[in-house]
Image (spheres, helix red, strand yellow):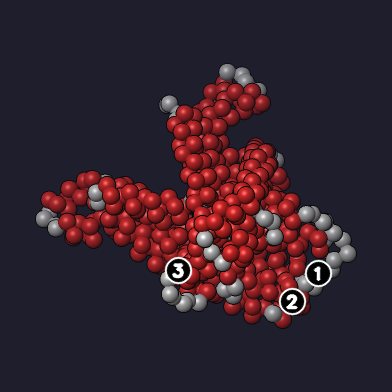
Amino acid sequence: MLSQILYALPFLAEGFAVTLWVSLLVVVLSLIAGVLLGVGLVYGPAPLRWAVRIFSDTIRGIPILVLMFFVYYGLPAVGLHLQSFWAAVLALTLFKTAQVVEYVRGAVASIPKGQSEAAMAIGLTFRQRLTSVIFPQAFRRFLPPWINGVTDAVKGSALVSLLGITDLMQAVNQVIGRTYEAMPLYILGALIYFAVNYALSYASRMLERRFAFIRD
Amino acid sequence: MGYTLNFNLIWRHFDKLWGGLLLSLELAVISIAIGIVIGLVLAVWYVSAGRVVRTIIAAYVEFIRNVPLILLVYLVFYGVPTVIDLAYSAPTSFVVTLSVYSGAYLVEVFRSGLEAVPRGQLDAGKAIGLTPWQRLVHVRLPTMLRITLPALSNTFISLFKDTSIASVISVPELTYGAQWINFNTFRIVEVYLVTTAMYLVTGYALLFALRLVERRFRAAR
């Protein structure tokens, strides 16, 4: 049993690399899209605000799995052909983007109104108010929930295995298919996910301590 | 586009989706009920226990929270029966998984709720001569439940969405029904549009109903 698992380790490592790559892509892409849409939700014109609100409430209201199947099977039907890898990344990114939008909205809303009134009173332009007063403070409020959400991206990435992508989850399943050592391999897989996510949440607590505290 | 929407086949097989939705709700309700019991017992135990018990409970919570649900579902359904001589159906297996999963999240919810119960209430309970057990049942738990109600309803909604994972072990819930129709009729866009709508309407109806319940109990402060 042990030798079979040792033999499978390089294969699992390849799957693990895919898991990390998917997670990284999703985290980075959703950060960019989510911050842009989030700022649009708070400061944009009414049609944009409604569009982002509907996008976010819809995406957050359905299971990621359904979103993923919708994107994967649905896009080719309307003539858009994406590799399964990118379809999976797109679906996970859409989901995460909706979360980031809410973190941004919450962070900006938590800044007292007096801050932007004071900035207005000393004659800052709208843009200066955002970049010098609101965003630096909102950033500290945004960071803790966002960092906590990074582990969700790693966990969510396990669903790409259902589209035939050989991530860690799929690699574990394939090794089990070959060796029939279900329990040891699921536990090994769980421990790898656990190690990554635990390290991430530890790092997040450190960062939180460093950045998130606002002295009033 | 070259794709014309045609919902006829969806309606013909709608029982797969409707039955699936009911099963999804059933799985979520049973799982959160068991999860609440696990969460309550462990949270109450945690706040009064020594270091060893605390470490074990914390290990359970951290392990579950840091591992993908789909892996836990596989582990319980395909892994556990290879070690223990037990036979169980896929729905049972999923309910066990989701209960243990939600239990881990609810321990945290209840634990912070217990800590948020004002000290004065416990002192008042002591002052009128309640035993520790009476203080727990009549003072601490009711107040804690009121504090944690919003978190509880959020957990329930998210468990309802998590039931879609049951499709990977062929539990015929809503997502499984959608896939069945997808593979058998190829009305892909239609079936996922309808399924999305069903998840959204149910999810928001639940949210609305639970918010009403929260308001009802919050008013009684």
Distance in Å between CA atoms under marks 2 and 3? 36 Å
In the drawing, what numbered circle is on residue B83? 3
What secondary structure is marked by label 2? helix
Q: Amino acid at mark 1?
A: Leu
What secondary structure is marked by label 3? helix
How crowded pointer 1 is (Cα within 10 Å; few <14, some 14-19, many 20+) is rated as few
Q: Disc 1 designates what residue?
A: B5
Q: Are marks 2 and 3 on the same chain?
A: yes
Distance in Å between CA atoms under marks 1 and 2? 16 Å
How crowded pointer 3 is (Cα within 10 Å; few <14, some 14-19, many 20+) is rated as few
| Residue B18 location, quadrant | bottom right
Q: Amino acid at mark 2?
A: Asn
Q: Nearer the viewer, residue B184 or A134?
A: B184
Toward the front, the furthest residue is A3
Pointer 2 or 3: first along the chain = 3
Picture residue at 69% right of the left edge, 80% below the top: B13
Q: Which is in the foreground here, disc 1 or disc 3?
A: 3
In the drawing, what numbered circle is on residue B184? 2
